[in-house]
Amino acid sequence: MKVIVSVGGSVLAPDLEADRVEAYASALEGLETDGHTLGTVVGGGPTARDYIGTARELGANEIELDQLGISVTRLNARLLIAALGERAAPTPPTNLESAREAMRRGDLPVMGGTAPAHTTDAVGASLAEYVNADLLVLATSVDGVYDADPSSVEGAAKFDSLSVSELVDVVADIEMNAGSNAPVDLLAAKVVQRAGLRAVVVDGTDPENVVTAIEGGHDGTEILPETDA
Ligand code: UTP
């Protein structure tokens, strides 16, 4: 299968533990050995939020804050590149074309962000559309998509599956400031919708969940293209 994996910075680099990044690299290498073709995108996590918070206090505007966030996503991407060694393209591709070229060469591209006003989930969805991926895996710090924010709403319920238009409705009302906290950003949901992509949201804190998202048996949320819903 051709799969794009978007790994939240909060799951890959909540701190700078080498073991965690190493475990991700091993899971991705195992998937490639099993015959899957992969592309990856890495988020900025708490480090991006810290930088964005400080720069916001200093008066930076939202685009400037997004640019800071993008820089941190690329730093995190370089951690995963370091762990993947020869299998990875040596620098994080800064646009979709370079990532696609890397995949065609047989390298594993590890992207960070690309342009302001969205998150790496949207980059992952766009790359998945661009390379005609069979599946987009969103490895996040929550274990799926909920009908309300589970960190603040008691009794929020997790979807085992939902249609992409239901996903768009769930995320449409969430704020989109730099560093915002949506399970999937609205642009990502819209790209998944127009591309007719199959997507899965899993708890990425255990990279094994990325493996089961691809090979079967995951307990995250399946996002169904309209025709299957
Ligand atoms: P992330 O993609 O990491 O946000 O980008 P996230 O998904 O909320 O966080 P984690 O990693 O899953 O915890 C961090 C910030 O960088 C900017 C945005 O400000 C975003 O909130 N960003 C990132 C962009 O502006 N464009 C991009 O392509 C990527």
Image: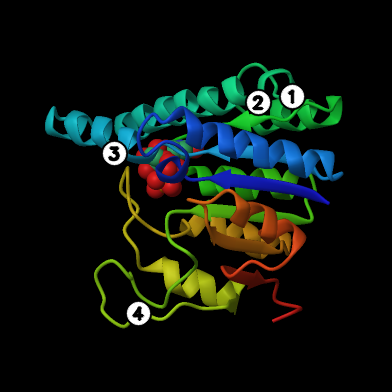
Please rate how many residues cluster around mark 1, counting C-alpha atoms within 10 Å: few if below 14, some from 14 to 19, many from 20: some
- Please tell me whether mark 4 or mark 2 is closer to you in this view: 2
Determine the image quadrant of residue 135. Answer: bottom right
Query: Label 2 near label 4: C-beta < 8 Å?
Result: no
Q: Where residue 89 sits: x, y (%)?
A: 70, 21
- Tell me the SS state at disc 3: helix
Query: Label 2 near label 1: C-beta < 8 Å?
Result: yes
Which of the labelled discs sits on residue 207, or is there none?
A: none
Q: Amino acid at mark 4?
A: Ala
Q: Amino acid at mark 3?
A: Arg
Front one among 143 and 127: 143
- List the residue tagged with mark 1: 87
- Earlier in the chain: of badge 4 and badge 2, it is 2
- Tell me the SS state at disc 1: helix
- Please tell me whether mark 1 or mark 4 is closer to you in this view: 1
**Residue at image coords 60%, 57%:** 209
